[in-house]
Amino acid sequence: MYNQNQIQVQTLLDLIGNTPLIEIKKVWFKSGVRILAKLEAFNPGGSIKDRAALAMVEAAESSGLITSDKVIIEATSGNTGIGLAMVCAVKGYRLMLIMPESASEERKRILQAYGAKLVLTPAHLGTDGAIEEAYRLAREYPNKYILMDQYNNQACVEAHYKHTGSEIWQQTGGKITHFVGCLGTSGTVMGVTKYLKEVDSQIKCIAVEPGLRHKIQGLKNMQESYPPGIYNPDLVDEILRVEDEEAFELCRRLAREEGLLVGMSSGAALAGAIKVAKRIENGIIVTIFPDSGERYLSTSLFLSPEKRGIEFVGLDGKKVLLCPQDNAFNFFTFGPTLDDLKNLSAWRRIVFLEVLARYFQHIGIESIVIVGISDFDDRTLNYCRLKKVSREDLIRESKKELAKVCQKFGLQKIEFAFFSERIEIALEICTDLLTKGKAYEKLRSVYFDVRRQDNYGYLGLKDIQLRPKQDIIKGRYLKDNPEDFTLLKRASLQDLKEGEVLNTKWGKVRPSWYLQQASILSSLQKPVQMVVAGEGQVFPHLDNLISLLKNKNKELPKAWGVVLGVKDEVDLDIFSLSEDKLKVLKGWLVSSSIQKRQKLTLESLKMWQKNYQKISDLWFKLNVLPFKDGDLCSEIEGLILKIKGDLRQLFESGFKIHLFWSNLFNFIKQVNYILNNNQLTKEDVSSIKNILQELNKIFDLFEEERISFDDNPPEKIKELLLERKQARVNKNFALSDKLREKIEDFGYKVVDMGTETVVLLHRKKNGLNE
């Protein structure tokens, strides 16, 4: 190991170890408590894994396992591989590393530069797939390969017992009170803890692990991965869990505020150290920063959440990275027609996008959903004639109805944009296109010449010749080319009679749907990152829209998507539904993949009502039941970290909202199990309520008003409760559900506790209470 007093060393390997400690003073400060970080990037290979690599190779040499005809192999795509490659290069050994094909190119090039041979395993199998392949090779070809097996190699523990632990003790003058280290192979934590406990059993040794489905490279959650053979959880005093974003943000702050460019696991280590620091009054906490941040520059680590972007596969089949602009991420979709405001396919798009907007708001990014309403089309005018109302009156009433539905739906991030308020923009677009020669006027109608538009049809069909032919109505349209689309069409006699026309220099006309929606989008002051259409609005609708926006020199949205429609088998008038029923419908609308059509039935709504019942029941229990004192238990902490990780992963990997529900209901099931066994503490309940409130802000799951007991409900309610209790005893759950609904119609909430206890809660004045 390297001695800092040495002027010259024999080999590069002599520089491994004796890395410096540095105090963290700006990212965290508390009088009486110091956090010291050991900077392992000072090792010649750039990470703490140099220590383990050297120890494993030297242990194999000492035991005579390494021979000239054997190849050293190991499963790693990270720092261990780089450490081994460096050690083998110095010592002259051949090395083969097995890693997932998804490993970063920079890592692969570093390893190849050291002379290592790489074997790639399927990406979807992750590191476990590489480990399995390494074990197979070592098992089937024992005379050819020698496996280092860092996960089971005691030399990894000994390296930190003999050196890292000893260094920490000496560097702090024996004054260390707490050690905090992250779990990967666990060699560092096991070795350092073993040493420190031997020299002073009062030193608290705390391990840090990430949540489930984490993205912190180099770390392991021991519940979802193969636990290393060298890992002994009983050796440490405590295991803390940290969230991905908590660790990543600390990495960014360390770079900005302390000048320390460190890797992902360093942020996790500091997060754990800060958790410990917050609860003690005096002490010296030592943690380890395993590597440098330079190896993570190709990742999104050093990008703030608003700049990291979200991957989305658009209609053209290409993957795009969607990033907010000016800390805003806005959506646009086409609204329902004024003759069919209750169209569920349109509301499915609106509700889906509103949930996305709420998520962005949740992570600190402004977001709205702009809904374009075409109010000068044939359907609108025909509806006006049917109802014998003017178009202006219909628009005015439609605005009221839309606002009312949004309020009852609980939609807070919606803005409706009507074409009639943007007529001048439509005329400007037509004038500009005619001036450029990209549109032409014929018989008092104006058409867009698609042959003058590069790459027309790329969202629909690549080959314009393969597109379905548009019908030409004899005597009404005489286009130069049947593929051209209408911008302004000549008014009919009925239009002229009613005065529902635009007076233009080309004659009395009416705007097409395409021109109306393009005018709305062109008029927006806020940038739109994503446009979402219905399944019948892709071709030619979006391609025509893109053509008009391009010629307006309007910056195009980065992504174009589609949400399939709803087949309505229930005669459902959303304008007459109560808020509770609309909340159920709202949840159902985002319960399936947007790439699948939804089939609305009474059974599907009843099922979703029961799902919501589970959520609200848990919320009520958490608010009214007594709980014991105590700290947050690790199981609840793990469940909360997992649900947060699931939420982030599914939203930020293509807006896969529908996959989140099973995770949420599994979370509720597990919490209920712990609750029903009387194992929840007040701290557990507080943390569970916090995460439920976070989710409620995104999904609008339940009412958050505080609930209280009603010790003496009316006689009618008591009778219904007795009848329901008997139904449950008889296992007549259908009757039990009907009686529950009947009780709730009177303003009471029934919450079942196991098989016996029924808690009666008074919610609001209603029915018998008035």
Image (cartoon, rainbow, N blue to C red):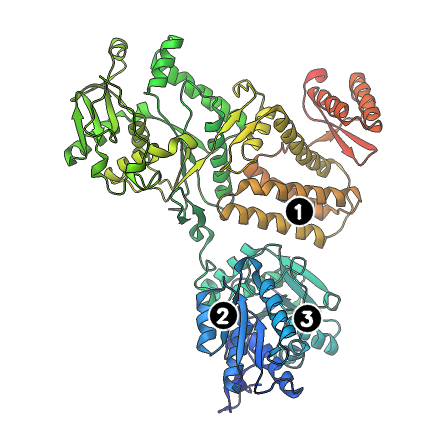
Q: Position of residue 488 (x, y in %)?
A: 24, 24
Bin the neighbour count of mark 1 within 10 Å (Cα to Cα): few under 14, some 14-19, many 20 and up: some
Q: Amino acid at mark 1?
A: Ser
Camera sees residue 501: yes
- Residue drawn 49% across and 75% down? 117
Q: Quadrant of residue 747?
A: top right
Bin the neighbour count of mark 3 within 10 Å (Cα to Cα): few under 14, some 14-19, many 20 and up: some
Pointer 1 residue: 687
- Residue drawn 80% across and 31% down? 758
Q: Amino acid at mark 2?
A: Ser
Q: Nearer the viewer, residue 109 or 29?
A: 109
**Of helix, strand and loop, which one carries label 2?**
loop
CB atoms of marks 2 and 3 within 8 Å:
no
Q: Nearer the viewer, residue 134 or 619?
A: 134
Pointer 3 residue: 177
Q: Position of residue 84 (x, y in %)?
A: 54, 78
Q: Quadrant of residue 297?
A: bottom left
Nearer the observer: mark 1 or 2; the answer is 2
Which quadrant is the C terminus positioned in? top right
Pointer 2 residue: 292
- Residue drawn 49% across and 77% down? 116
CB atoms of marks 1 and 2 within 8 Å:
no
Establish if 65 lies above or below 29.
below
Q: Amino acid at mark 3?
A: Thr
Establish if 157 lies above or below 338.
below
Establish if 319 lies above or below 264.
above
N-terminal of the two: label 1 or label 2?
A: 2
- Residue drawn 50% across and 48% down? 652
Cα separation between marks 1 and 2: 33 Å
N-terminal of the two: label 2 or label 3?
A: 3
